[in-house]
Image (cartoon, rainbow, N blue to C red):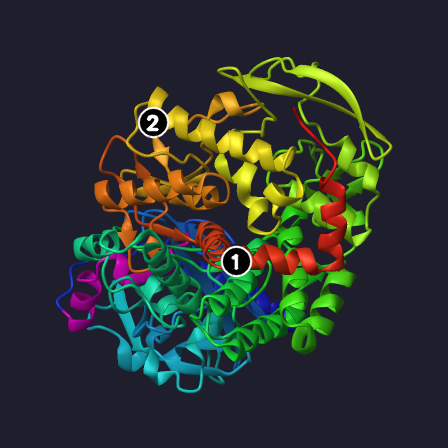
Amino acid sequence: MKLIKTISLFLILLFLFPNPSFSKSSTTSSINQYLSGLSQNQKLTIDNFSTVGRNKIGAESTLTSPENTHLRKTYRDEDAIYKQGRSLEVIFGLLGKNQFQWKTQLEPLDISQAKNISFWYQGTFGVKESLRVRLVDINNNQKEIAISPYVGQKEKNKWKPVLIPLEKFEGVDLNYLKELQINLHSGFLGMVGQVIIDQVEFSGPADLSFASLKDNLKGFPKQISNLQRRKSLLKLDSRLMLKQIAKDTWKYFDNFVDSRNELIVDHVKLDTNRFLGDYTSPTNIGLYHISCIGAYHLGFIPRAEALRRIQRSFATIQKLKKHKNFLYNYYNTTHMHPTSSFISSIDNAWLAVSYVVIRSAFKKELGGQASSFLNQMDFDFFYDPGVGQMSIGYDEAKKAYSSFHYSLLSTETRMLSMLAIGKGDVPKEHWFHLYRIPPTKWDWQTQKGKEKAESFGGFDVRTGFYKYKQRRFIPSWGGSMFEFLMPTIIVSEKKWAPLGLGLNNKIASEIQRDYALKERKYPVWGISPCSYSRGKETHYGEFGIKALGVKGYNDAGIVTPHATFLALETIPEDAIENIKQMIRRYDVYGEYGFYDALQARGRTITRQYLALDQGMSFIALVNYLNNGSIQQLFGRDPIGRKVQALLKDEEFF
């Protein structure tokens, strides 16, 4: 009997809807006028059904129904409400009181500034009275609303707009939306019919997505360009100028931490197509910790405030999903879930370095917890004893280590090696397996270095040098400033290795300066990976001086201010003059300090702040203005003392 009912219902469906086709028509309803008047940045499209099984934010969409329910699902190009995407068509047969459900995941989503949820539909008799919209938040608070009071007036069986005010979903937290459903409910007699759905969206004020994330931040720059601010900086003496720049730069960390969890957002783009990078990395978190200590050292915040911020961050770190106590490469700052399955060795090293600095700065209050986090991170996990080098990382999804290793000494990744040796996680001999210059078999390198064999601390090491206009140096990979100098914000290499890394850093800085000013005739210098603008788009690029690198990046005429702040450690007078030149010549300074990059021979400014580059700049300023206070904290720790012993004997030239 059950089988007969099922077959009968299916035949009825085929008879009623052999080849359904609905047409679009113009609308004069207020709902339709509202929807058609929205600009692209006033709405967030959740699904236009362009990808089967995935919505527009990359999460899963499904159509489900209980037993004894008959569904035929198709995606129709010809019936899309707009030219982009398709529409979802469902021919259904529901026996008795029942329902089918279209459900799309939101990961969850912060859409707190949205005012309405909308979609378009066509349907047979009874669909308008049977459709419901349900929103579910991360805590499973949920509410379902019938669409019938919120449908625009249209002709029967034509596209009809639905616009539901989000205030109707009282009790659902729009900061953490987990799921959106469109459900069709039948009564006791069941229901057969057809519905087509398209263009499911949230709408609200301009820059809707941006505004919804922005409201979690403490503050935000009010002006993009300010000539008066630049002029006022140049009136100050050099030290006061640098302190004001430090104060402005700190505002990024003061204001751009998500108030819900103390996670620093990765970046913000401020001019055309404003965008907030609502994710973070272990490096960002580590630099935020150290910047809090630096802000206390410079008197920008009291000690209690620095402690409170780090304690809140620790509470969040405790909750984050990890792999063998290491953080994944990126986390979304709204739902705090990993957005990558990759575990980066160097990024985790920068986080671990912050624990060293924290336990040295706040031994009584945070020393125990910082040590606990640090001790749980065993960097032997990344060590490959076969080559004596550290793997770039591990991909949990692939269950495999990267096939590449960090093999060069003179790059920012030496911080990983110093930390791992200082902790005792890897043997000291690892340091001497790092190439001072690469093997001659790398026949693609920018020049063939002069090699020699030496012995330090009982270990044999193959060393040597490259040359730039008769100046000897140990190369980095790309010839960029941050490769040579980023570790110096923590490790005082000029004091601990004055004839080794410290000397090499100074030579690399001088070559950077001379290359830009004398060879390329740029007005300013400082070339390193950074954001750069190409039309309305902003990208992150690797820039350097080819002659300074083994592979060598191209400079592309792009200068980044963070490179100059790092050079306060090596050639401070030249660095200060370069900072002044950038302020004089370019509209590159905002409320939160220097923007990320400029075109040396043009007027293009990349009005974007990056947590990484703000962190390097700010900590370098703290060290310069406060007698190397961050370096001193690291050096006082047992790990720092082991690093000093590791560096002290080697002479490069």
Q: Is residue 37 magenta?
A: yes
Whether residue 341 is visible here, answered yes or no, is no
The residue tagged 1 is: 280
- Report the front residue among 99 and 475: 475
Q: What residue type is disc 2 on? A: Leu
- Quadrant of the image occupied by residue 290: bottom right
Q: What residue type is disc 1 on? A: Thr
- Tell me if residue 123 comes above or below residue 174 in the rendering: above
- Tell me if residue 536 comes above or below residue 370 in the rendering: above
- Residue 517's disc is 2
Q: Position of residue 565 (x, y in %)?
A: 43, 46
Label 1 sits on a secondary structure element that is strand
Q: Which residues are magenta?
A: 29-49
Q: Position of residue 214 (x, y in %)?
A: 36, 67
Mark 2 burial class by Cα count in 10 Å: few <14, some 14-19, many 20+ = some
**Looking at the rendering, in which quadrant would you find the C terminus?**
top right
Q: Position of residue 24 (x, y in %)?
A: 23, 56
129 to the left or right of 545? left
The answer to whether the residue labelled 2 contacts the one labelled 1, judged by CB atoms less than 8 Å apart, is no
Number of marks: 2
In terms of sequence position, does the residue under pointer 2 or pointer 1 come before the other? Answer: 1
Tell me what residue is drawn at x 37 percent, y 34 percent: 525
What's the CA distance linking mark 2 and mark 1?
35 Å
- Report the front residue among 553 and 334: 553
- Quadrant of the image occupied by residue 434: top right
